[in-house]
Amino acid sequence: MIAVLDAPSNLGLRPPREGHEPGVRRLARALRGHGILGRLAAEDAGRVDPPPYLFGPDEETGYLNGPGIADYAERLASRVGELLDTGRFPVVLGGDCGILLGPMLALRRRGAFGLAYLDGHDDYSPRRDPAAVAGRLAAGGTALALVTGHGPGALADIRGLRPYVAEEHVAHLGVQVEPEDVELFDLAAFDASRVRRFPIEYVRQHGADAAARGARDHLEAAPIDGFWIHLDADVLDRSVMPAVDSPNPNGLSFEELTSVLTTLAASPRALGLHVTIYDPELDTDGMAGAALTDTVVTALDRAGLKRTD
């Protein structure tokens, strides 16, 4: 049975403007407003509230809200773990991408697991100028690096469990590189990683279905006990999903994303998913949020997960 859990954390994003918290904290409420709970015939698993958002730097971890993110990861991991232990398929409504630490920590406590990473950015490559953001690194933009063991122990090695997922047990789908990325990030690090990559160029050449099947095949062939699905709304094209902090000019259509999610969620080894980065404050008419909700509901229905047993 599907269980919908709210994880309305925005701790992993920098303020969009001075003194203003990122609006992704309203993602869960917005998708619930579009009826996701009833349409999935899902159990209401409640919410895990994050610590207060702090605007100042944290020099000890190097990350904005670093201590709060570490605390939240453990509490979210405990709740996700409870759902997994009772046979539920958690659908976690974020939040920024930093909430990934919670589910992956929950799985790491239980053995070796994998990750399907649907995102328009790699969330792995280190910055070329770390001093420029000292104390203000954003966990939302480095989530994949953190869960694969790259980063301060307070975030990447909670309870001595680094890495929460091995790089070779990750399939990344949808990344695209823009000129500013080359200037800001050491992209060679991601290229040299053991992450299996299906970038947007692969999707355009072979199709979204082939990319999804390749990602699923990779994860099903790995020596793991299952995998989690990470969905960042910025994997979608900005023409259909402008309500994200970093819209992408060559992303997936909603139809392509529905196909990808269906293929992945239909795997008997898929254990749960979360949705991140959609910002209702940037979606004045609510249409992008409605379409995102439709996509998740349709994909899980086609995957055979929308059931009440």
Image (cartoon, rainbow, N blue to C red):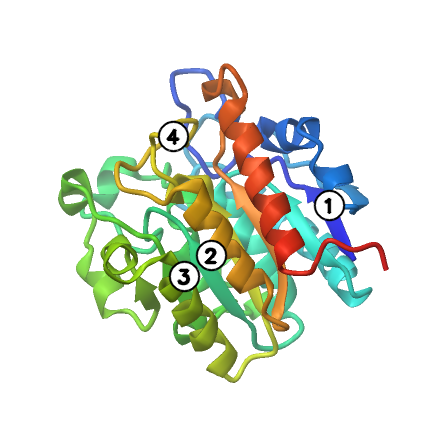
Decide which of tag 1 and tag 3 comes sooner along the chain. 1
- Residue at the spot 52% in from the left edge and 41% down from the top edge: 276
Residue type indicated by callout 1: Leu
- Is 278 on the left or on the right of 9, as rendered? left
Residue type indicated by callout 4: Asp
Name the image quarter holding the N terminus: bottom right
Decide which of tag 4 and tag 2 comes sooner along the chain. 4
* Element under disc 3: helix
The residue to which callout 2 is attached is 260
- 209 w.r.t. 99: above or below: below
Q: Which of marks 4 and 2 is in front?
A: 2
Decide which of tag 4 and tag 3 comes sooner along the chain. 3
Residue type indicated by callout 3: Asp
- Is 301 on the left or on the right of 139, as rendered? right
Q: Distance between the residues labelled 4 and 3?
A: 27 Å
The residue to which callout 4 is attached is 245
Q: How far apart are marks 4 and 2 (CA)?
A: 23 Å
The residue to which callout 1 is attached is 40
* Element under disc 2: helix
In front of the other: 100 or 162: 100
Q: Distance between the residues labelled 1 and 2?
A: 18 Å
